[in-house]
């Protein structure tokens, strides 16, 4: 499961965009979040390179830009702290 968020930021190393603000789980190829929020109508950006289950590691310490994580998406994906590799949907292009 990947990530959709209401905002984004780029860390000091500048490698890639990371989610900020309100965060949902999102499955690539869909136009809505896992909990059913339409991405475009809600103004959510897609982060196909960010695993939803890895958000804790990404936002811990100095970079905590995530204000709210959707509890429905958390429940559906089994929570952030469980790194379930089998949720990967396929090889990277
Ligand atoms: Zn959600």
Image: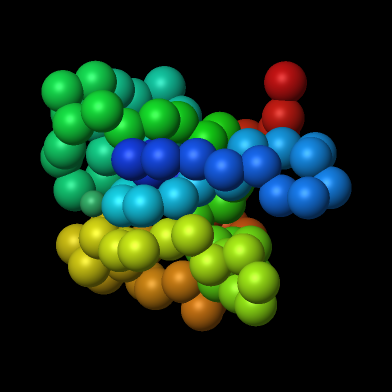
Residue 29, given in percent of the width and then of the height, sits at 41, 22
**Residue in the foreground of this view, choosing between 9 and 74:** 9
**Residue in the foreground of this view, choosing between 88 and 38:** 38
**Colour convention of the picture:** rainbow
> Where 8 falls versus 20 (above or below)?
above
Residue 26, given in percent of the width and then of the height, sits at 38, 41
Q: As drawn, is 16 to the left or to the right of 79?
A: right
- Position of the C terminus, as image quadrant, is top right
> Where 68 falls versus 82 (above or below)?
above
Q: Residue at x 33, y 25 (%)?
A: 30
**Residue in the foreground of this view, choosing between 52 and 77:** 52
Residue 69, given in percent of the width and then of the height, sits at 32, 63
> Where 61 falls versus 16 (above or below)?
below
Q: As drawn, is 10 to the left or to the right of 2?
A: right
How many discs mark residues in the rendered view?
0
Q: Residue at x 31, y 52 (%)?
A: 22
Q: Residue at x 45, y 50 (%)?
A: 20
Residue 90, given in percent of the width and then of the height, sits at 62, 35
Quarter assignment of residue 70:
bottom left
Q: Residue at x 43, y 61 (%)?
A: 66
Q: Inspect this view and state whether residue 89 appears.
A: no
Q: Inspect this view and state whether residue 45 appears.
A: yes
Q: As drawn, is 63 to the left or to the right of 23?
A: right
> Among all residues in the image, which is located at the extreme right?
13
> Where 42 falls versus 93 (above or below)?
below
Quarter assignment of residue 61:
bottom right
């Amino acid at each position: 499961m990947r990530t959709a968020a209401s905002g984004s930021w780029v860390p000091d190393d500048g490698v890639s965009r990371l989610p900020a603000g309100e965060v949902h789980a999102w499955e690539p190829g869909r136009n809505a979040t896992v909990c059913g929020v339409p991405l475009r109508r809600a103004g959510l950006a897609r982060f196909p390179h960010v695993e939803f289950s890895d958000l804790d590691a990404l936002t811990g310490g100095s970079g905590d830009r995530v204000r709210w994580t959707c509890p429905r998406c958390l429940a559906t994906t089994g929570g952030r702290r469980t790194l379930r590799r089998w949720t990967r949907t396929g090889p990277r292009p």
